[in-house]
Amino acid sequence: MATTTTTTTTSPTTLDQIKSALKHPEVIILDVRTKEELDEAPLASKPFKHASCHLDDCSELMSKAAELMPNKEAPIIVFCRSGRRAGKAKEMLEGMGYTKVLNAGGLGDIEGL
């Protein structure tokens, strides 16, 4: 596993930051993969919340955000299949006022957490 994960224009999220966030009692693990991707590669190891986010359309995530993540101060670890949409979701959530959003990258980046 790499020491840093997929990033956007903000500073990289490190593995240590993700591990630290996972210890927080209110941490939210957010999967932004599509329904089809969920069916192809389901995750059973950790509880997570789901809202699809596409590179050109994050409307489902935007409409579900308040319900799925009511505390804008809680750490949110976002991942997708490869990491690109997780970066897009991170930007969207930060634009909505969420303050502790971490891009964990893709499925390969979160294995073993």
Image (cartoon, rainbow, N blue to C red):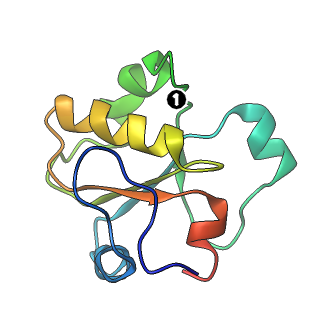
Across and down, in percent, residue 3 comes to 44, 80
The answer to which image quadrant residue 26 occupies is: bottom left
Q: Where is residue 107 in the image (x, y as percent from the top left)?
A: 65, 61
Tell me what residue is drawn at x 51 percent, y 38 percent: 85
Q: Give the secondary structure at mark 1.
A: loop
Residue in view at x 18 percent, y 42 percent: 98
- The residue type indicated by label 1 comes to Cys
Q: Residue at x 52, y 34 (%)?
A: 51
Q: Relative to 100, does residue 9 appear above or below in the rendering?
A: above
Depth check: 100 or 71 in front?
A: 100
Q: Residue furthest right?
A: 40
Residue at point 31%, 43% (across, down): 69
Q: In which quarter of the image is residue 47?
A: bottom right
- Residue 82: image x %, image y %? 62, 50
How many C-alpha atoms fall within 10 Å of the one at disc 1: few (<14), some, or many (≥20)? many
Residue 85 appears left or right of 111: left
Q: In which quarter of the image is residue 104?
A: bottom left
Q: Mark 1 points at which residue?
A: 53
As rendered, which of 31 and 7 lies closer to the eye?
A: 7
Viewer-closest of 1 and 52: 1
- Position above or below: 57 against 13: above
| Quarter of the figure that contains the C terminus | bottom right
Residue 53: x and y in percent read 52, 29
Q: In the drawing, does residue 59 fall left or right of residue 96?
A: right
Q: Considering depth in this image, is 90 or 35 the residue closer to the camera?
A: 90
* Image quarter (top left, top right, bottom left or bottom right) of the N terminus: bottom right
Up the image or down, 75 lies above or below 72; here it is below
Query: 51 left or right of 101?
Result: right
